[in-house]
């Protein structure tokens, strides 16, 4: 009987530790990002080696039964120019960026400031880079200012003449979608 009670107590402790492990800064930031589902509009501006700017639209929606947030940035009409997918990998918040340069940098949140609602993503690796498309995203800063305002900063690098910073400021135009995924 003691063995059974000890075993039950150990299982309970392991379950409690497992649940506590899920409550991490990465998980809390991802939960905050999930609230971005909906339609957005805003502006973009280039600096530090690139010039230009303009208006853009963005859509956020959940997929994978709520396990991933898709961000589509629409700069020319209704076709996404860039898509990022945010998700958890254990305790880590990750993102894969599907770039207009036809490459796919993968990044990991290396600093999360829960008070400011921000996450800094650092470069992990990149796929599909060649001499023809050597520029890629090396870092991303994302700040959820409040439920209706988001700021993004993409740091581009990876090749000669390819560096630059793209700053995006978004404001919600439609409320979140009624269902958790599309």
Image (spheres, rainbow, N blue to C red):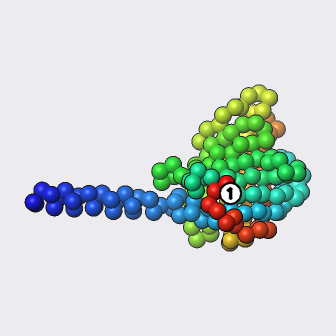
Toward which corner of the image does residue 54 lie, by quadrant?
bottom right
Residue to which mark 1 is pinned:
61
Residue at 62% x, 49% y: name it.
Answer: 95
Q: Position of residue 137 (x, y in %)?
A: 71, 44
Residue at 84% x, 57% y: name it.
Answer: 56
Residue in front for this viewpoint, 165 or 71: 71
Toward which corner of the image does residue 36 lie, by quadrant?
bottom right
Q: Is residue 76 left or right of residue 119?
A: right
Residue at 84% x, 60% y: name it.
Answer: 43
Q: How many marks?
A: 1
Image quadrant containing the N terminus:
bottom left
Name the residue at the left extreme. 1
Residue 91 lies, with reference to residue 105, above or below; the image says: below
Label 1 element class: strand
Residue in front for this viewpoint, 1 or 76: 1
Q: Position of residue 109 (x, y in %)?
A: 58, 53
Q: Position of residue 86 (x, y in %)?
A: 62, 52
Residue 167 lies, with reference to residue 173, above or below; the image says: above
Q: Position of residue 5 (x, y in %)?
A: 16, 61
Mark 1 closeness class: few <14, some 14–19, many ≥20 residues within 10 Å: many
């Amino acid at each position: 009987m003691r063995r059974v009670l000890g075993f039950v107590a150990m299982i309970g402790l392991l379950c409690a530790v497992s649940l506590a492990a899920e409550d991490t800064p990465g998980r809390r930031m991802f939960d905050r990002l999930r609230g971005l589902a909906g339609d957005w509009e805003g502006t973009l501006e280039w600096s530090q080696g690139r010039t230009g700017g303009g208006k853009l639209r963005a859509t956020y929606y959940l997929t994978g039964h709520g396990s991933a947030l898709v961000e589509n940035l629409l700069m020319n009409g209704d076709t996404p120019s860039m898509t990022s997918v945010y998700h958890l990998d254990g305790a880590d918040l990750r993102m894969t960026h599907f770039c207009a340069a036809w490459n796919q940098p993968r990044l990991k949140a290396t600093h999360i400031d829960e008070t400011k609602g921000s996450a800094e993503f650092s470069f992990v690796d990149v796929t599909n880079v060649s001499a023809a498309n050597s520029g890629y995203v090396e870092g991303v800063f994302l700040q959820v200012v409040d439920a209706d305002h988001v700021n993004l900063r993409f740091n581009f690098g990876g090749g000669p003449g390819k560096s630059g910073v793209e700053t995006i400021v978004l404001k919600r135009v439609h409320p979140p979608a009624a269902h958790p995924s599309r």
